[in-house]
Each structure stands twice: as structure tokens, then as C-alpha cells.
Amino acid sequence: MKSATTQSPLAGRQRILEACTPLFAESGFHGVSMRDVAGAVGMTPAALYYHFPDKDALYLAVIDRLYQDRVPGLLAQVVVDGSPWERLERLVNGIVQLNLTDPNLLRLSQWILLDRDPERTRRLGERIVGPFLDAVSSLVSGINDDIDPRWAALSVFSLVMLPFHAAGVTADLPGFRQPTREPAALTAHVMQMLRMGIGSREVR
């Protein structure tokens, strides 16, 4: 029988990423050790280091895998036929649905925002945040050229993501409509806010 270090490198790498994704999603970068990952995968720490030189490389690979499996199709919503508003609504709805169907991705997005390591945040910005900002900025520019498209793009993500990130503290507040129960309502609300904001030519 082949040992962990002599199995297919690709197969071993995928097995590690699948096993440690929920660990990082639950506890973040600092809450997970390489020994934790090795235990979850069922291999020795030495075998784990055969595939990933350090925890930074492993963490970034986890996030890369999640986003690369899902984000290209989502960003494709901005290049298909339709007006800028129609394409923006498809993108907003896609982000809402992604948050609902992939809790690991949602939790990791929270940890990404909390990360304070300069090099890690730079790389995460380039790989994850940058492509989203580019896509939304291009749509905003086609709607209203009187506002900063990059700031507007950040506002779009704030409107979509905060209801999910704050779900725990708002769950019992009277009158609050949970996005997990009303995704269509959240999409409609975000689009209403955007039409009142970036759709207005009176923005200063």
C-alpha cells in the first residue's frame, strides 16, 4: 500500500483541502494548527508538510479552491446580455444564493475581513476582493459616472453581506427579516437601495 507521501500529490492535496476547509471556516487562520489539520486528514504533520510548506500556503489554498470553484460562474453574470441594472441584479442574487448554499464560504469571508496580516490580506485582496470590485465597478460606471465606482462596489457588497454576517445578533430583533428565510426579499431590497443611490443623478 502506498504511504500518504507517495500517493498522487493532487489527490492528497484535494483530500487535505476538503478536510480542513470546515476547520478554517469555523475557527479562522489563528484557530487552526497544522497538527489539527493533520489529525482531521488522518496523516502525520510531516506528510502534511509534504503538500504544503506552511499554514499560510494551506489557508490561501483553501480560500483559492472555494472561490475558484464558485466565483468565475458568478462573475460571468456581468458579461451576459442585459442592461447594467439587469446584470447587477443577477450578480447580487448570485451572491445571496452563494451565501445560502455554502456556509463555509460565508464564514471564511468573515475571517478574511478580520485578518490583520499585511501579506496575507494583500494576497487575499488580489485573488478574492479585486475581481469582485472590478466586475461591480464596471457595471456602476455604466449606470452613473458621477460617483466613484470602487466605493460604490464596496457599498454593494456591504448591502449584500452584512445581513448574513449580522444574522446572529439580529435573529431575535422584532421585525427583522432573516435573509436565510427571504433571499428574494433581500435581493429586492438591495436593488431598491442601489437604484435610490447609484441610480440617482443628484448624487454629490
Image (cartoon, helix red, strand yellow):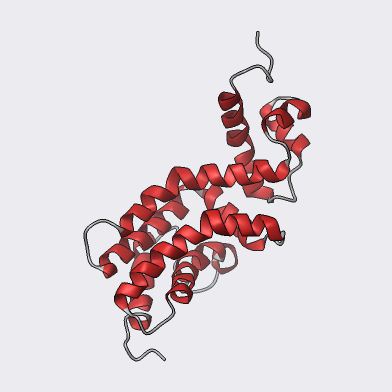
Q: Nearer the viewer, residue 168 or 197?
A: 197
The location of residue 200, given as percent across then percent down, is: 32, 85
Identify the residue shown where x is 34% and y is 91%: 202
Q: Quadrant of residue 51?
A: top right
The location of residue 31, given as percent across then percent down, is: 74, 49
The location of residue 100, given as percent across then percent down, is: 45, 53
Compared across the picture, whether 39 is left or right of 168 comes to right
Q: Which quarter of the image is occupied by the N terminus?
A: top right
Residue 179 visible, this orientation: no
Identify the residue shown where x is 75% and y is 51%: 30
Identify the residue shown where x is 68% and y is 51%: 28
Q: Is residue 59 above or below residue 118?
A: above
Q: Nearer the viewer, residue 173 or 39?
A: 39
Compared across the picture, whether 188 is left or right of 168 comes to left
Q: Is residue 175 above or below residue 1?
A: below
Residue 106 visible, this orientation: yes
The location of residue 152, given as percent across then percent down, is: 44, 75
Compared across the picture, whether 24 is left or right of 94 comes to right
Count of numbered labels shown in the rendering: 0
Q: Quadrant of residue 110?
A: bottom right
Q: Is residue 107 above or below residue 190?
A: above
